[in-house]
Amino acid sequence: MYYDTVMPRPQATSRDQVLAVAEDLLAREGPSAVTVRRIAEALGVSRQIVYSRFADKADLVRALHAEGFARLHARAAGAPGEPGTDAHVRAVGRAYREAAHADPALFELMFGRPVPEFAPDDEARAVAVAAFAPVVEAARAWLARRGLPSDDRASVRLARRFWAVTHGVVSLELSGLLGTDAGAMLDRLLGAVLADAATTDPGPSFTATE
Protein backbone atom coordinates (compact mmCIF):
# COMPACT_ATOMS: atom_id res chain seq x y z
CA MET A 1 0.00 0.00 0.00
CA TYR A 2 1.14 3.52 -0.68
CA TYR A 3 -0.29 6.34 1.35
CA ASP A 4 0.19 9.02 -1.32
CA THR A 5 -1.87 7.29 -3.97
CA VAL A 6 -3.99 4.58 -2.38
CA MET A 7 -5.01 5.46 1.14
CA PRO A 8 -6.21 8.70 2.69
CA ARG A 9 -3.64 10.35 4.89
CA PRO A 10 -4.31 9.53 8.55
CA GLN A 11 -5.08 12.30 10.99
CA ALA A 12 -3.06 10.61 13.72
CA THR A 13 0.14 8.89 12.74
CA SER A 14 1.10 5.78 14.68
CA ARG A 15 4.43 4.02 14.83
CA ASP A 16 3.01 1.20 12.69
CA GLN A 17 1.87 3.66 10.02
CA VAL A 18 5.31 5.21 9.84
CA LEU A 19 6.84 1.76 9.55
CA ALA A 20 4.37 0.75 6.82
CA VAL A 21 5.28 3.79 4.71
CA ALA A 22 8.99 3.17 5.25
CA GLU A 23 8.60 -0.43 4.10
CA ASP A 24 6.61 0.68 1.08
CA LEU A 25 9.30 3.17 0.06
CA LEU A 26 11.96 0.50 0.55
CA ALA A 27 10.09 -1.94 -1.68
CA ARG A 28 9.16 0.58 -4.38
CA GLU A 29 12.23 2.77 -4.63
CA GLY A 30 15.03 1.11 -2.70
CA PRO A 31 16.96 1.95 0.47
CA SER A 32 17.89 5.49 -0.58
CA ALA A 33 14.20 6.46 -0.54
CA VAL A 34 13.80 5.58 3.13
CA THR A 35 14.30 9.03 4.61
CA VAL A 36 12.44 10.92 7.29
CA ARG A 37 11.56 13.61 4.76
CA ARG A 38 10.02 11.16 2.27
CA ILE A 39 8.11 9.34 4.99
CA ALA A 40 6.73 12.58 6.39
CA GLU A 41 5.68 13.74 2.92
CA ALA A 42 3.91 10.45 2.21
CA LEU A 43 2.01 10.69 5.48
CA GLY A 44 1.27 14.39 5.14
CA VAL A 45 2.84 15.21 8.50
CA SER A 46 5.87 17.08 9.74
CA ARG A 47 9.22 15.38 10.15
CA GLN A 48 8.92 15.97 13.87
CA ILE A 49 5.96 13.57 13.96
CA VAL A 50 8.14 10.86 12.45
CA TYR A 51 10.93 11.64 14.93
CA SER A 52 8.41 11.34 17.76
CA ARG A 53 7.83 7.71 16.73
CA PHE A 54 11.47 6.80 15.97
CA ALA A 55 14.59 8.42 17.35
CA ASP A 56 16.31 8.58 13.98
CA LYS A 57 16.61 6.74 10.67
CA ALA A 58 18.73 4.00 12.21
CA ASP A 59 16.02 3.37 14.81
CA LEU A 60 13.41 3.10 12.06
CA VAL A 61 15.52 0.71 9.99
CA ARG A 62 16.13 -1.38 13.11
CA ALA A 63 12.36 -1.78 13.43
CA LEU A 64 12.11 -2.86 9.77
CA HIS A 65 14.93 -5.34 10.37
CA ALA A 66 13.09 -6.81 13.37
CA GLU A 67 9.81 -6.96 11.45
CA GLY A 68 11.43 -8.93 8.66
CA PHE A 69 12.73 -11.53 11.08
CA ALA A 70 9.38 -11.70 12.85
CA ARG A 71 7.72 -12.57 9.54
CA LEU A 72 10.40 -15.14 8.76
CA HIS A 73 9.86 -16.76 12.15
CA ALA A 74 6.10 -16.86 11.64
CA ARG A 75 6.40 -18.53 8.24
CA ALA A 76 8.92 -21.12 9.43
CA ALA A 77 6.91 -21.87 12.57
CA GLY A 78 3.82 -22.41 10.44
CA ALA A 79 5.44 -24.81 7.98
CA PRO A 80 3.16 -27.83 7.38
CA GLY A 81 4.04 -31.46 7.91
CA GLU A 82 4.76 -33.76 10.80
CA PRO A 83 7.80 -32.63 12.80
CA GLY A 84 10.68 -35.05 12.42
CA THR A 85 9.90 -35.98 8.83
CA ASP A 86 11.90 -35.09 5.74
CA ALA A 87 8.76 -33.45 4.38
CA HIS A 88 8.61 -31.06 7.33
CA VAL A 89 12.24 -30.02 6.91
CA ARG A 90 11.62 -29.31 3.23
CA ALA A 91 8.49 -27.35 4.16
CA VAL A 92 10.52 -25.17 6.51
CA GLY A 93 12.95 -24.51 3.66
CA ARG A 94 10.10 -23.58 1.35
CA ALA A 95 8.68 -21.27 4.03
CA TYR A 96 12.03 -19.47 4.17
CA ARG A 97 12.00 -19.09 0.39
CA GLU A 98 8.40 -17.83 0.46
CA ALA A 99 9.32 -15.21 3.05
CA ALA A 100 12.11 -13.94 0.83
CA HIS A 101 9.87 -13.77 -2.23
CA ALA A 102 7.10 -12.04 -0.31
CA ASP A 103 9.37 -9.20 0.85
CA PRO A 104 12.58 -9.20 -1.23
CA ALA A 105 13.60 -5.66 -0.26
CA LEU A 106 13.09 -6.48 3.41
CA PHE A 107 15.05 -9.70 2.94
CA GLU A 108 17.97 -7.71 1.56
CA LEU A 109 17.76 -5.35 4.51
CA MET A 110 17.81 -8.29 6.92
CA PHE A 111 20.93 -9.91 5.48
CA GLY A 112 22.72 -7.17 3.57
CA ARG A 113 23.87 -3.68 4.46
CA PRO A 114 21.85 -1.49 2.07
CA VAL A 115 21.29 1.33 4.58
CA PRO A 116 24.59 2.88 5.75
CA GLU A 117 22.99 4.38 8.85
CA PHE A 118 22.15 0.96 10.26
CA ALA A 119 24.53 -1.83 11.24
CA PRO A 120 23.10 -4.69 13.34
CA ASP A 121 24.37 -4.65 16.91
CA ASP A 122 24.18 -7.45 19.46
CA GLU A 123 20.50 -6.75 20.12
CA ALA A 124 19.61 -6.87 16.42
CA ARG A 125 21.64 -10.04 15.94
CA ALA A 126 19.81 -11.63 18.87
CA VAL A 127 16.50 -10.85 17.13
CA ALA A 128 17.81 -12.54 13.99
CA VAL A 129 19.02 -15.64 15.84
CA ALA A 130 15.71 -15.98 17.68
CA ALA A 131 13.89 -16.05 14.35
CA PHE A 132 15.60 -19.34 13.51
CA ALA A 133 14.22 -21.21 16.51
CA PRO A 134 11.72 -23.11 14.28
CA VAL A 135 14.60 -24.30 12.10
CA VAL A 136 16.50 -25.57 15.14
CA GLU A 137 13.38 -27.30 16.43
CA ALA A 138 12.82 -28.91 13.03
CA ALA A 139 16.38 -30.22 13.13
CA ARG A 140 15.95 -31.44 16.71
CA ALA A 141 12.76 -33.32 15.86
CA TRP A 142 14.35 -34.87 12.78
CA LEU A 143 17.36 -36.10 14.75
CA ALA A 144 15.26 -37.41 17.64
CA ARG A 145 12.97 -39.34 15.31
CA ARG A 146 15.99 -41.29 14.07
CA GLY A 147 17.52 -41.89 17.46
CA LEU A 148 20.41 -39.55 16.74
CA PRO A 149 21.82 -37.09 19.29
CA SER A 150 19.40 -34.18 19.42
CA ASP A 151 20.96 -31.99 22.10
CA ASP A 152 21.39 -28.27 21.49
CA ARG A 153 24.77 -28.61 19.83
CA ALA A 154 23.69 -31.29 17.37
CA SER A 155 20.40 -29.55 16.58
CA VAL A 156 21.99 -26.15 15.99
CA ARG A 157 24.69 -27.70 13.83
CA LEU A 158 22.17 -29.42 11.58
CA ALA A 159 19.94 -26.33 11.51
CA ARG A 160 22.89 -24.26 10.29
CA ARG A 161 23.35 -26.69 7.42
CA PHE A 162 19.68 -26.28 6.52
CA TRP A 163 20.08 -22.52 6.74
CA ALA A 164 23.26 -22.38 4.66
CA VAL A 165 21.72 -24.41 1.84
CA THR A 166 18.40 -22.57 1.90
CA HIS A 167 19.85 -19.08 2.16
CA GLY A 168 22.37 -19.80 -0.58
CA VAL A 169 19.73 -20.97 -3.03
CA VAL A 170 17.33 -18.15 -2.20
CA SER A 171 19.98 -15.44 -2.39
CA LEU A 172 21.20 -16.63 -5.79
CA GLU A 173 17.63 -16.92 -7.00
CA LEU A 174 16.73 -13.37 -5.95
CA SER A 175 19.90 -12.13 -7.65
CA GLY A 176 18.69 -13.67 -10.90
CA LEU A 177 21.57 -16.14 -11.02
CA LEU A 178 19.51 -19.35 -10.97
CA GLY A 179 17.01 -20.72 -13.42
CA THR A 180 13.37 -21.39 -12.85
CA ASP A 181 13.89 -24.61 -10.91
CA ALA A 182 15.20 -23.02 -7.70
CA GLY A 183 12.41 -24.58 -5.65
CA ALA A 184 13.18 -28.06 -6.90
CA MET A 185 16.90 -27.43 -6.40
CA LEU A 186 16.27 -26.43 -2.80
CA ASP A 187 14.28 -29.60 -2.14
CA ARG A 188 17.06 -31.76 -3.61
CA LEU A 189 19.81 -30.04 -1.65
CA LEU A 190 17.91 -30.28 1.62
CA GLY A 191 17.37 -33.96 0.86
CA ALA A 192 21.12 -34.37 0.36
CA VAL A 193 21.82 -32.69 3.71
CA LEU A 194 19.37 -35.04 5.41
CA ALA A 195 20.83 -38.10 3.73
CA ASP A 196 24.31 -37.10 4.86
CA ALA A 197 23.14 -36.34 8.40
CA ALA A 198 21.54 -39.78 8.63
CA THR A 199 24.80 -41.57 7.80
CA THR A 200 27.46 -39.30 9.32
CA ASP A 201 28.75 -39.81 12.84
CA PRO A 202 27.49 -36.69 14.63
CA GLY A 203 30.45 -36.73 17.02
CA PRO A 204 30.33 -35.76 20.70
CA SER A 205 27.50 -33.71 22.10
CA PHE A 206 28.05 -30.19 23.40
CA THR A 207 25.88 -27.37 24.61
CA ALA A 208 24.85 -24.71 22.10
CA THR A 209 27.13 -22.15 23.74
CA GLU A 210 30.33 -24.14 23.45
Image (spheres, helix red, strand yellow):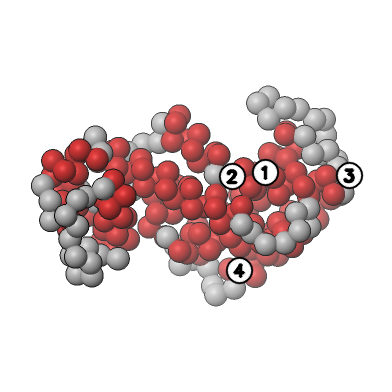
* Residue type pointed to by label 1: Val
Q: Secondary structure at mark 1?
A: helix
The residue identified by callout 2 is 132
Q: Earlier in the sequence, mark 2 or mark 4?
A: 2
The residue identified by callout 3 is 147
Q: Report x, y in % for residue 91.
A: 66, 61
Q: Which disc is residue 183 wearing?
A: 4
Within-10-Å neighbours for mark 4: few <14, some 14–19, many 20+: some
The residue identified by callout 1 is 136
Q: On screen, 64 above or below 153? A: below
Whether tag 3 and tag 4 are in contact, CB under 8 A, the answer is no
> If the image is split into quadrants, where does the N terminus sit?
bottom left
> If the image is split into quadrants, where does the C terminus sit?
top right
Q: Earlier in the sequence, mark 4 or mark 1?
A: 1
* Residue type pointed to by label 4: Gly
Whether tag 2 and tag 3 are in contact, CB under 8 A, the answer is no
Q: Secondary structure at mark 4?
A: helix
Whether tag 4 and tag 1 are in contact, CB under 8 A, the answer is no
Q: Report x, y in % for residue 207.
A: 72, 27
Q: Report x, y in % for residue 16.
A: 31, 49
Within-10-Å neighbours for mark 2: few <14, some 14–19, many 20+: many
Q: Residue at x 64, y 67 (%)?
A: 185
Q: Report x, y in % for residue 114.
A: 33, 48
* Residue type pointed to by label 3: Gly
Q: Secondary structure at mark 3?
A: loop
Q: Residue at x 47, y 64 (%)?
A: 101
Furthest residue in direction right, as rendered: 147
Q: Residue at x 36, y 47 (%)?
A: 64
